[in-house]
Image (cartoon, rainbow, N blue to C red):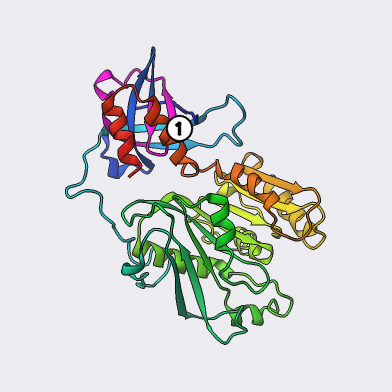
Amino acid sequence: MKYGKLLAIGGLAALLPLSAIQAAVWRAVAVKNGETVELWTSDGIRYPVSCSRFTDSLLNQELLVAGRLIPVGPLREGQVRRVVITRAIPWQPPTGGVQFRPEQRNTYAKTARTLPETELKPEALLTLELPELGNSASSGGSAPIKMCVSLPSDYKRATPHPVIIHFGGGTGGTGDWQHWRRITGPENFIIVTADYNHDENEKKGLLKIGTCRDFNSKIAFHALQILRNSTMTDPKTVILTGFSSGAYSITDNLKNNPKAWQPFSGFCAIAGGSKAGSARIADRPTLFIIGANDTMRHKWLDEAVDGLKRNRPEKLFVEKVPGVGHDWPEAFTPLIRKWLENFPAYGSSARLDAMTREAPDDSVRTIVESWKQ
């Protein structure tokens, strides 16, 4: 059972329309539990309510709630995640139901390209060539950069699915989506993998030593724009990850380009990473995971960890796995899954199932069931 803590409702923000509040927005239902009230969100998280402004008139009905999560670092046993709620109003379903809305033009990159609509189906695997970005390092410069998109088994175009964007090791490629699909399971997550630019990495001297990267998140941004031109995504869970040299696409950009990290909710550097540090990403969970016997990357990993620890020790997670060299073994899976618990979208299906079983009446049960559709 996953709990958060509700600190407040009201204040000046309560007088503002929801569109004017710069906050995360949840669909939720308020449920009486003895003498206390719990706010159950569509992520499957429960927030105890301790505010007298939350009246009985808001109970047992679907609400639209605006709020702001307060980082508390890794959740320890018995600890709750805190959130400030700025507004709660009855949910008004949009006319005609929830519909797909494309992202505003050029939000992440200047491209109007989309994924083929006829191929947007549960469990689909889509590959799109991106010649506008140049040729790929993995092809030796002979073929266009590609992006690969793995859709979840419960995919719906109008559902805001969480996203993982990943870059592979060496000269790259798009095959690592399979690693992430085994970690996340078949549901919920959209997984995107992409190539590196051949000419840029050759010019930097990185191609010949097999440590390619996505400079300034250019390819990641382009892929994210195409994805959002095509389908809904959850802005609270867009995770950038990389294996080996792919981890440099994360850590280099955290330091060198203040805009390169902005669309992402968190970062996962697997068996790699370089010196980096930014106080501006203090609320974004970052995982460094590496084999204890990985002599290829420890120097760079230590630099990266030291740089980040100075600014944000509570949101930095470091795992050194015994008996593992420069690899991405199954032993990493439970540790990565544990880290993913920092994102409400991970594990939401099981939490919603529990809410369905524990709903106090049919009205609440119907609301929770609607979130699972």
Residue 347 rendering spot, x and y as whole percentages: 49, 41
Of the pair 35 and 128, the residue shown nearer to us: 128
State the residue at coordinates (41%, 35%).
Answer: 352
Say whether residue 78 is magenta: no
State the residue at coordinates (72%, 80%).
Answer: 208
Residue 190 rendering spot, x and y as whole percentages: 45, 57
State the residue at coordinates (64%, 78%).
Answer: 201
**Residue 311: in sight, yes or no?**
no
Q: Quadrant of residue 25?
A: top left
- In the rendered image of this protein, does residue 360 appear above or below residue 258? above
Q: Identify which amino acid the numbered label 1 is placed on.
A: Val
Determine the secondary structure under disc 1: strand
Q: Quadrant of residue 227?
A: bottom left
**Residue 85: in sight, yes or no?**
yes
Of the pair 19 and 112, the residue shown nearer to us: 112
Identity of the residue furthest to the left in this view? 95
Residue 281 rendering spot, x and y as whole percentages: 56, 49
Residue 269 rendering spot, x and y as whole percentages: 65, 56
What quarter of the picture does the C terminus occupy? top left
Crowd band around label 1 with a 10 angstrom C-alpha radius: few (<14), some (14–19), many (20+)? some
Residue on which disc 1 sits: 83
Q: Quadrant of residue 335?
A: top right
Left or right: 141 as drawn, with respect to 24:
right
Say whether residue 60 is magenta: yes
Left or right: 179 as drawn, with respect to 156:
right
Magenta range is 39-66
Left or right: 272 as drawn, with respect to 178:
right
Of the pair 176 and 299, the residue shown nearer to us: 176
- In the rendered image of this protein, does residue 184 appear above or below residue 47? below
